[in-house]
Image (cartoon, rainbow, N blue to C red):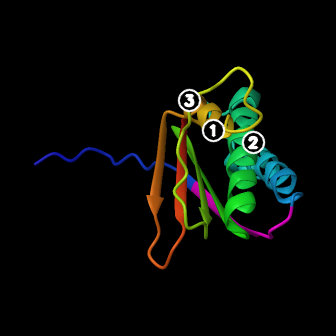
Amino acid sequence: MRTRPRTHRRSVGVEYLLPDEAESACRARRLTWQFLVWRGHRTAGLDAGHIHDAALVVSELVANATRHGGTCRLRLQVSDTQVTVEVYDRSPGRPRVRPLTTWGESGRGLAMVHSLAQRLDVDPVSGGGNRVRAVLAL
């Protein structure tokens, strides 16, 4: 019997707890940049454009979470093929992508995330709240 060598996908993750403050989205964006540009996480497909997209997704999701659900948790994971962003909040309502309007002053965040992500999931969390997961392909 022949065996093939196993290929291991490298995956690294981090988690942050962010307070219910307007500055949390900016802080989360900065933490995302720092995490993704850290030398040990560099993968062949991760470039400045991917990092920018991930930081934008994080900023929008954290802004929504702190606005509607107070404090939130941000999880980031990067592998050879994707960047996964997860934001957990305590909001009683479920976030949804709304149709874009010409004059709307809000409601564009999830639509923007949806257009940047390969996959966008919104799931309820036991005990209340939501998990919003965006997967960005490299």
Q: Are marks 3 and 2 in contact (CB under 8 Å)?
A: no
Q: Nearer the viewer, residue 34 or 8?
A: 34
Q: Earlier in the sequence, mark 3 or mark 2?
A: 2
Identified at 60% across, 66% down, the residue is 91
Q: Earlier in the sequence, mark 3 or mark 1?
A: 1
* Relative horizontal placement of residue 48, taking residue 45 as reference (left or right): right
| Label 3 element class | loop
Q: Which mark is residue 55?
A: 2
Which residue matches tag 1?
Answer: 43
Q: Nearer the viewer, residue 75 or 66?
A: 66
Identified at 60% across, 33% down, the residue is 111
Specify few, some or many for label 3: CA neighbours under 10 Å numbering under 14, 14-19, or 20 or more: few
* Relative horizontal placement of residue 78, taking residue 27 as reference (left or right): left
Residue 19 pos. (x, y %): 80, 70
Q: Amino acid at mark 3?
A: Pro
Q: Which mark is residue 99?
A: 3
Q: Earlier in the sequence, mark 1 or mark 2?
A: 1
Residue bounds of the magenta highlight? 12-21
